[in-house]
Image (tube, grey):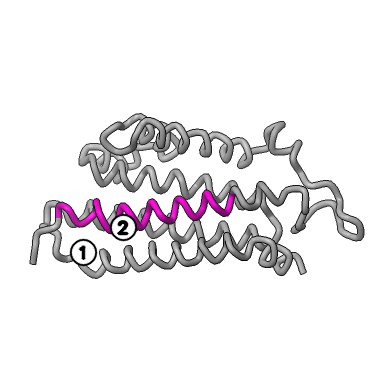
Amino acid sequence: MIRSGYDRVLAAELDAFYKVLDAALDAEITEDAKLSDWPDNNLKQKAFVLAAFRKVINDLLGCVEILRAGYCDLCQGVLRSALEGFATAILIDKDKERFKAYREGRFSVTKSVEIFTKRRDMVTSEAGKQFLRVYKRLHKMAHPTIVAMAVQSPPVEGNFPIGGVFYPLRLQLYCDVTNEMTNLAKNVEGYLRTEFPKGRPLL
């Protein structure tokens, strides 16, 4: 019942999301198949990067399934993890020293978004600001902050006040979160299609 409510009102947004997510997964699978083409001095780094992108894709799939089950706030917490994973994947791909720190457990992924959004060689100023704004909102929703507790859906007639719920007055939020997931999936595909192959030797 709850899932059908989301599927009905978010039909266009969900269709767009699943198409983009499939494209991101195809891009990751394509690069994974070519992993052995990398020279030995890059192979381990590129394997870690692909694994990080794979986790982002998996997080995004989890996000949409959690949302459709009626847990929008939990969905936003997982989306926060996906944003951290995306930023981390790019940082460890572009910077060998940062990759070394990541591999040795000396790099905090919770700081990755802030570092990423300040790197003008990786993201434009406006895109970085938007990325950081979304992340900061999601960060608040992932913890028992005043903001997170204040937006808990009130009881719907006949339903228990906790658990999965579709709340019509939060429809705009549901659309916004789904679109944010779609945009992140687009960014994953875009990076894997255009940036990731640049350093790989031509066959």
- CA separation in Å, label 1 and label 2: 9 Å
Task: Identify the image quadrant of the N terminus.
Answer: bottom right
Q: Residue at x 34, y 34 (%)?
A: 124
* Mark sitting earlier along the chain (1/2): 1
Task: Identify the image quadrant of the C terminus.
Answer: bottom left
Q: Secondary structure at mark 2?
A: helix
Q: Residue at x 57, y 40 (%)?
A: 138
**Residue in the foreground of this view, choosing between 56 and 23:** 23
Where residue 132 appears, x then y in whole percent?
A: 47, 34
Could you tell me if the residues under marks 1 and 2 are in contact, i.e. CB atoms within 8 Å?
Answer: yes
- What's under tag 2, amino acid-wise? Leu
Residue 195 falls left or right of residue 40: right
Magenta region, residue range: 177-199
Where residue 60 appears, x then y in whole percent?
A: 50, 57
Asked where in the image residue 147 lies, by quadrant, the reply is top right
Q: Is residue 182 magenta?
A: yes
Q: Which mark is residue 50?
A: 2
